[in-house]
Image: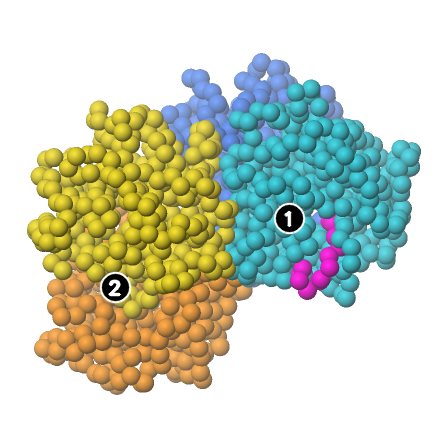
Chain colours: A cyan, B yellow, C orange, D blue
């Protein structure tokens, strides 16, 4: 591989009402607002030294733009372009200046049809890690991962591992040893990108890292104080998979946000991916209430890199079930 | 009143298998085992300087013995006897020596038929508050309260306030201003004794005080590690009523235990009881998953102070509903 | 006794610059500002349902006004007046309307010459306990205690216990069994009022209750972020005495504030006061850095209830030493 | 570079009394004891899936054996050997079977004379991350870093960055822009290896990662309960550098252990190292008590890879000072 993907670095999502979203993300969850204009709100976590990790874009139609991955060097974007073209997959350059605070980027669709974006450069900003006086709500530290439903998990799993250089930390498989869900990483946590079996490609959730477990409890308290109690969809609880202490929220447009703390270091190349059996109840949810129906059934569409239209989806290749351990 | 009730001080419950209960209460929850014999297990919290606050008694039939209240002075027991006799309520002396570590006690049935026990003296033991090396599981500090279902809450509410000197911190009332549930205290927390509308008298749960919110999270983790994940019935969550951060567990015999932290000081005589409307959804659960059916429907019987037989119950006088805020 | 003292309820201190104090107490520590005028700032904790527990009064001279104790009923103030007069101690009525939000109060000097104030009524305000969106800094919950240096601790100890009805939770004594320091309470915590041997009467510190240990850590972080790092005088650490997790701060005028969490319930009348030997090093500080010299030597003067002048002090009757366990 | 160093993976230290050390590391701090024999105790953290990260070796003389770094592949060890030989630095092979649970390793001395060891393979063991019932004391998760005093920090800094592929996250420099201390990493935290100006090469401390800040507080409580209160040398406090919440302990032989939580992700190649001025007091300790003299003056010797003798040291090239921010 002539490119080195560093980590998931940002997501861009359409929202219907910027003020309403700002109240949720900034006032309640504690994101730092880096910048805003009439059409966008640029948000980051307290630890982040780059301009944003979440962009809210005003639009009439909901949907998720290309998921943004940071690569090591700008010149690696050509290698990525060559690779995706060779695979017969769509690509599109976004020149510097097209997107606020970003250097040039390469947009593509992956084997599942999911839109991605690669870039090396984003404008730097002051890191607020030690501005504890600004800590609010969930004390969001940084973007951690994205989790997507795709029709053929094994195909995505193979592509990300073999072609893009991701490593697998944990996965679930059915009785036929078919991969039902997978947690894949480039940075040294449990995942940057997770896939699970479902109609897709769809975004299931965006995960953000918190500094400690009490930040989740405090966030619940703040959400309830501000009238957002109903936004809590699942948790708090402990994942068996990843070991993280978690909370799932639904934002005012229905996007699912995971607050996440406490996975482990995945630096070692000889760490063997942990397999979880789909039908082994003993190894499922570590503890916590069952996930509600909505958690399994409601996901958000992706947008095409050329047309901006919602991408058509395919039915999953494996049976849909509701394993409690799914992140 | 010629007596001064200090606080709820102990409960005695029948269990079927002492070893099984010991594994749950001592190894998983972190109770200190003060003493045991073939028929009893005497447990206390880390802060408690008295012999026990929970007695597990081996028996074939499940049920709850008289709830134990500490009074200020031994000679006040005669005043209590006189009062209950005057009310036409059953009383029974348990001489010193009858019950391990306890001075003489007076057993009675209250206006709801619920068995109580009053005593002034219990043997002292070493307080383990600063033996942090012994902290395990939930780091149980001390008994906090009991919550009971009774057929006529208003009758119990009046009796405990007017005749026994309890104060009310919070209560729920229906549209006709009938008291549906009440939180009553003698010590300066939110409650020693709560009542709620239901078939009764039945014990709903025993609440224990924890040192901080993370003790609840750690307890969930430990329970899951030891295979007790299914014992978690409700929570963690935050009560609107009392403001406590809570977790409800079911022990191996089905008794419900609440782990509880974070209510407030109720020292002030001019603090006005907080009223919560039964049908005001905005003021119900502060945050957390809905309580399951079992939480509303499953309670434990009391035993008669003379016969030891399960006490017959009556149907509730008010409509049974499921307000989420019930503690 | 014909009066019933409920708890320490407020302190009033002179400060030189209200804005400077507001930045410290409200912006950094997280007190709620109930009200202000040109001369006063009225502050309360998140749990408090009364107008204030701390009054900052603009003045050129620093000093502490009468320590405010809440009593059960207004009519008990006459009994207190009679008692203090009988003891030959100064008294002074402050009619309702004299002090913002307070009913009438009785000011006195106690046997150490320390100014006290008794009152039954204070205006009620909204309790912010469940306004978690307002939680800042140390998340101050409520006033907990005051600690004062007096020349003759045993005299104060006897007076508060025998004449005012306080109970002792813990104390230190020297080889001759003379009381060197004492922790006395009316409410059911370790103390409302502590005394220790020293030039006095002087105020050593005012203690405020926090919801959990992490609130202390977060407060340190916020103080450092805002440039108040040097205000941390001692801690965080764990007291042997009281078992509290603590932090001592010095406010912009030099008043010492203790942030305090984790003592224990003192409801039981048969709880025996814990004795700590002055010269037993094994039982001193539970853990934490040694207290600096300033902690032992710097205290604040009291003001006379009639003249408003600084009260003259006396040298301590026992040897001055530096036991690490002193709170 | 034809090798890829993954992370600091283990340290081996001589101790005088294995039982005494076991009581400290296992019973008090909560390390998992993987295995022991008459001469060794093999310890690991709860998250670690490899045999050990700390070896205590019984010996009459105290000292630190080669610091163990994990490399990506076994065949890279030859490339490392070639490199060190080319630099004229001593090397020595330790064949598989020589050291318990380890594959073959290459021992070397670096430019400061400090002994290192490279290996790719260590026996796997059960990861206890979700065995919360075994969590004790500090809940040690994994080895995080080593910090060493060397005579010429800039020389070491250049060698580790340019020749071994480390990246610098933060550093301190004096007025002449000479590097006084540096934090260098291979894994994506703030450091695997720190250097600071001082007589050396000496080991200053070994740092272990904890799951959350309360684990440090609980560890202090447990240490005090077990009589180890005097082992706390510095902290708890917050580092300006690295942002970690920390505690420094001295083990029964005097080795310094840091308990460490809360640094940040250093995945981004364009993250600019943070410079701290040696003489800028505003940017020093974030908060916490001053480090005692012992913290600056007491360090532990390294042992030679061939002779096992204590390595002679050199005086530092820069002025010795006591910047409070030093980790």
Residue A257 disc label: 1
Spatial CA distance of label 1 from label 2 is: 48 Å
Please indicate, yes or no, whether residue C95 appears anywhere in the rendered image: yes
Determine whether label 1 and label 2 are within 8 Å by CB.
Answer: no
Bounds of the magenta segment: A7-22
Q: Which residue is mark 2?
A: C193
The image quadrant of residue C86 is: bottom left
Neighbourhood count class around disc 2 (C-alpha, 10 Å): few under 14, some 14–19, many 20 upward: many
Q: Chain of mark 1?
A: A
Q: Is residue A10 magenta?
A: yes
Q: Position of residue C153 (x, y in %)?
A: 18, 63
Q: Position of residue A61 (x, y in %)?
A: 78, 55
Nearest to the observer: residue C178 or residue A60: A60
Seen in the picture, residue B137 relative to A104 is either above or below; the reply is: above
Quarter placement of the N terminus of chain D? top right
Position of D214 with respect to D315 (left or right) is: left
Nearest to the observer: residue D205 or residue C260: C260
Position of B54 with respect to C24 (left or right) is: left
Are the residues flagged by discs 1 and 2 from a single subunit?
no
The image quadrant of residue B108 is: top left
């Amino acid at each position: 591989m002539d490119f080195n993907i560093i980590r998931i670095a940002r997501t861009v999502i359409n929202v219907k009402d910027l003020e309403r979203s700002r109240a949720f993300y900034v006032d309640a969850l504690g994101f730092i607002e880096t910048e805003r204009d009439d059409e966008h709100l640029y948000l980051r976590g307290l630890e982040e030294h780059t301009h944003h990790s979440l962009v809210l874009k005003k639009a009439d139609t909901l949907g998720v733009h290309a998921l943004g991955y940071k690569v090591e060097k700008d010149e690696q974007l050509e290698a990525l372009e060559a690779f995706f073209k060779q695979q017969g997959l769509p690509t599109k350059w976004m020149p510097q200046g097209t997107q606020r605070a970003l250097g040039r980027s390469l947009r593509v669709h992956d084997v599942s049809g999911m839109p991605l974006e690669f870039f090396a450069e984003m404008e730097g900003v002051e890191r607020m890690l030690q501005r504890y006086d600004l800590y609010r709500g969930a004390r969001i530290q940084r973007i951690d991962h994205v989790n997507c439903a795709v029709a053929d998990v094994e195909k995505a799993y193979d592509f990300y591992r073999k072609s893009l250089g991701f490593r697998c930390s944990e996965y679930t498989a059915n009785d036929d040893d078919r991969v039902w869900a997978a947690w894949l990483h480039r940075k040294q946590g449990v995942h940057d990108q997770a896939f699970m079996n479902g109609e897709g490609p769809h975004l299931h959730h965006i995960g953000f890292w918190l500094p400690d477990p009490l930040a989740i409890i405090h966030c619940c308290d703040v959400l309830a104080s501000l009238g957002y109690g109903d936004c809590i969809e699942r948790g708090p609880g402990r994942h068996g998979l990843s070991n993280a202490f978690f909370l799932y929220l639904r934002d005012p447009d229905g996007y699912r946000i995971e607050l996440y703390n406490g996975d482990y270091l995945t630096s070692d190349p000889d760490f063997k991916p942990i397999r979880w059996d789909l039908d082994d109840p003993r190894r499922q949810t570590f503890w916590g209430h069952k996930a509600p129906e909505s958690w399994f059934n409601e996901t958000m569409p992706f947008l095409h890199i050329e047309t901006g239209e919602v991408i058509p989806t395919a039915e999953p290749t494996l049976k849909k079930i509701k394993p409690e351990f799914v992140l």
